[in-house]
């Protein structure tokens, strides 16, 4: 049986293990942060779709460094020891009425980041449609609870609705950028949209 490249530990997987992060995706956020400076010390940050916790942990360790606040939400539990003075974690659907009220209470936010991805089927059309649904909900959240001049980062599966997503982002943010970080696997069709300076 052939071994998939995804079953073998690549450079970023090994580096994540060495540096104590639960997933290699941390280096995607690091490159986005290095490029766009989306989060500043003292910010209040919302991490949507945060499990297994690499982005939350990176923001806590490398950017906020004990300042500001992180609100982290995912359907799955994060298996990390979290500093409750800085990090608040909610397990559940970020777009449900129950969780939405909790997020509103702790906002508004300086930045929203989302590496959320749907359960994939292997069918690109289905997976892209599911991704678009998630993306639309994250943008809706940003419209409601992101501060003026705030920033948004979200993951998109490239597909037929890319222009519509970009146009929607442009209606909310002064600048919209696309980036495919080096840590993305070569066979992945994910890309990250960055909204800068909410109108």
Image (tube, rainbow, N blue to C red):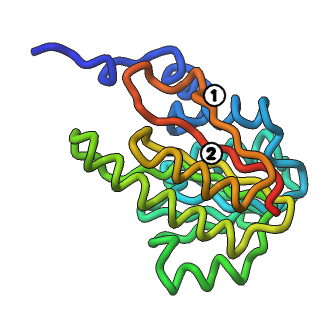
User: What residue did someone put label 2 on?
Assistant: 55
- Above/below status of 124 relative to 136: above
The furthest residue to the left: 1
- Above/below status of 110 relative to 192: below
Disc tally is 2
Q: Disc 2 and disc 1: Cα gap in Å? A: 13 Å
Residue drawn where x is 54% and y is 79% of the image: 99
Residue 179: percent from the left, percent from the top? 63, 31
Q: Secondary structure at mark 2?
A: helix
- Above/below status of 84 relative to 78: below
Q: Residues within 10 Å of mark 1 (few under 14, many from 20)?
A: few
Residue drawn where x is 78% and y is 30% of the image: 35
Residue drawn where x is 43% and y is 19% of the image: 186
- Horizontal relation, residue 195 to residue 133: left or right: right
Q: Residues within 10 Å of mark 2 (few under 14, many from 20)?
A: many
Q: Earlier in the sequence, mark 2 or mark 1?
A: 1
Residue 163: percent from the left, percent from the top? 53, 46
Q: Indicate which label's residue lies in the foreground, 2 or 1.
A: 2
User: What residue did someone put label 1 on?
Assistant: 19
Residue 181: percent from the left, percent from the top? 60, 27
């Amino acid at each position: 049986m052939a071994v998939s490249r995804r079953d073998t530990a690549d450079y970023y997987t090994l580096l994540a293990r060495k540096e104590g992060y639960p997933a290699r995706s941390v280096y995607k956020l690091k490159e986005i942060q290095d490029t766009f400076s989306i989060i500043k010390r003292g910010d209040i940050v919302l991490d949507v779709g945060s499990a297994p916790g690499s982005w939350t942990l990176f923001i806590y360790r490398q950017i906020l460094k004990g300042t500001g606040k992180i609100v982290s939400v995912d359907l799955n539990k994060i298996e990390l020891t979290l500093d409750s003075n800085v990090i608040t974690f909610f397990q559940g659907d970020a777009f449900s009425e129950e969780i939405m009220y909790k997020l509103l209470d702790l906002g508004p936010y300086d930045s929203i980041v989302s590496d959320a991805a749907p359960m994939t089927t292997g069918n690109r059309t289905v997976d892209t449609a599911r991704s678009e649904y998630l993306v639309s909900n994250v943008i809706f959240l940003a419209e409601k609870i992101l501060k003026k001049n705030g920033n948004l980062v979200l993951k998109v599966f490239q597909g037929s609705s890319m222009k519509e997503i970009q146009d929607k982002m442009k209606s909310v943010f002064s600048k919209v950028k696309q980036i495919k970080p080096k840590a993305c696997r070569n066979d992945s069709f994910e890309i990250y949209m960055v909204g800068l300076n909410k109108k």
